[in-house]
Image (cartoon, grey):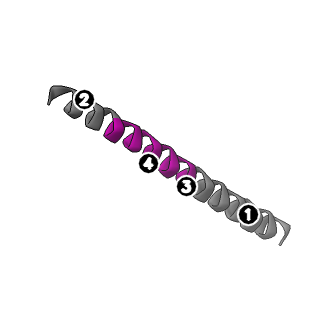
Amino acid sequence: MDALIVAAVTSVASSIATVITIRTDIGWIKRILDQHDRRIDSLEKERV
């Protein structure tokens, strides 16, 4: 029975850590894309 409890707690902790990591990665990707958009906009303005 103890092994089941340990497995359940470990599974829940792993799931929470995975969700936090994915959210962090998505936020990082959004910031990078925003920076790229700003760079592209500034380059396009320089060409005109």
- Residue at 50 percent across and 44 percent down: it is 28
Secondary structure of residue under mark 1: helix
Q: Residue at x 32, y 41 (%)?
A: 37
Label annotation for residue 43: 2
**Label 2 secondary element:** helix
Q: Which residue shows up at 72% across the image and 59% down it? A: 13
Question: What is the residue that sits farthest to the right in this orientation?
Answer: 2
> Residue at the spot x=55%, y=55% of the render?
23
Answer with mark 4 or mark 3, whichever residue precedes in sequence. 3
Q: Counting residues from the N terminus, which is met first, the one under dot 2 or under dot 4? A: 4
In front: mark 2 or mark 4? 2
Type of amino acid under label 4 = Lys
The 10 Å Cα crowd at callout 1, few under 14, some 14 to 19, many 20 or more, is few
Tell me the residue that label 1 is attached to: 7
Instruction: Tell me the magenta residue range.
Output: 22-38
User: Which part of the image, by quadrant, shows the N terminus?
Assistant: bottom right
Distance between mark 1 and mark 2 Cα atoms: 53 Å
